[in-house]
Amino acid sequence: GAVVSQHPSRVICKSGTSVKIECRSLDFQATTMFWYRQFPKQSLMLMATSNEGSKATYEQGVEKDKFLINHASLTLSTLTVTSAHPEDSSFYICSAMRGDQETQYFGPGTRLLVL
Amino acid sequence: SQQGEEDPQALSIQEGENATMNCSYKTSINNLQWYRQNSGRGLVHLILIRSNEREKHSGRLRVTLDTSKKSSSLLITASRAADTASYFCATDETGANSKLTFGKGITLSVRP
């Protein structure tokens, strides 16, 4: 149990376009989902916390108008990178938590390359 | 700033040897978790140790936590080539609403 998927696994887009990444908890209901960003050979940096049915809470320095997060159901959260630029190229990873547990279950990540 | 700081940053050992990785942190925590990441992949949860626990075992993994020193160690016994990966500690800080703060990670290479 506790499987989290992400789609797409890899995306290449042109500068200025928007990209949507989906994060799904496949076999459990996730009251909270988290979005992280990871640059090559670096650690994970938390971008935002998403609770079902409410607005996401963004970490300091993360632009909420650029990284739109929607947590419309207990099994799906989406991250939309709007007007993407080359510096947004990164590995984006989501995680999901059940309400009664302490463990975050991570998706396989989405590699974004903006040309 | 990074809450968790692992050391060493890189570790290379022979298959069959034990690997010990350390993590230090700065604030009060609810729990500390260790994760593994293979290159270009997502994270796999290895083990969680709560602030009132001192040691935990899971298969070939042994984790210790010393809250007085704000440090944790992850021991992998009888390492295998398949253990080659990056390992991260992550802290669930008190009052942080389950947000995890990750360390920089340790790259473990196990030579066959």
Image: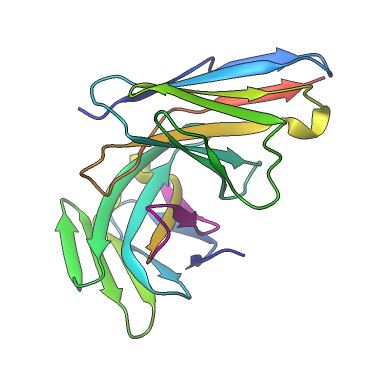
Q: Where is residue A31 in the image (x, y as percent from the top left)?
A: 32, 34
Q: Position of residue B28 (x, y in %)?
A: 39, 74
Q: Where is residue A99 in the image (x, y as percent from the top left)?
A: 25, 40
Q: Position of residue B49 (x, y in %)?
A: 24, 62
> Quarter holding the N terminus of chain A?
top left
- A15 vs A39, nearest the viewer: A15
Q: Residue A79 occupies which quadrant of the picture? A: top right
Q: Give the range drawn in magenta.
A: B95-112
Question: Image height check: is A88 above or below A62?
Answer: above
- View extreme (front): residue: A54
Question: Image height check: is A8 above or below B40?
Answer: above
- Residue B106 magenta: yes
Q: Can residue A24 be seen in this view?
A: no
Q: Residue B92 occupies which quadrant of the picture? A: bottom left
- B110 vs A7, nearest the viewer: A7
Locate residue A92 relative to residue A82 in the image: left or right: left
Locate residue A11 relative to residue B41 in the image: left or right: right
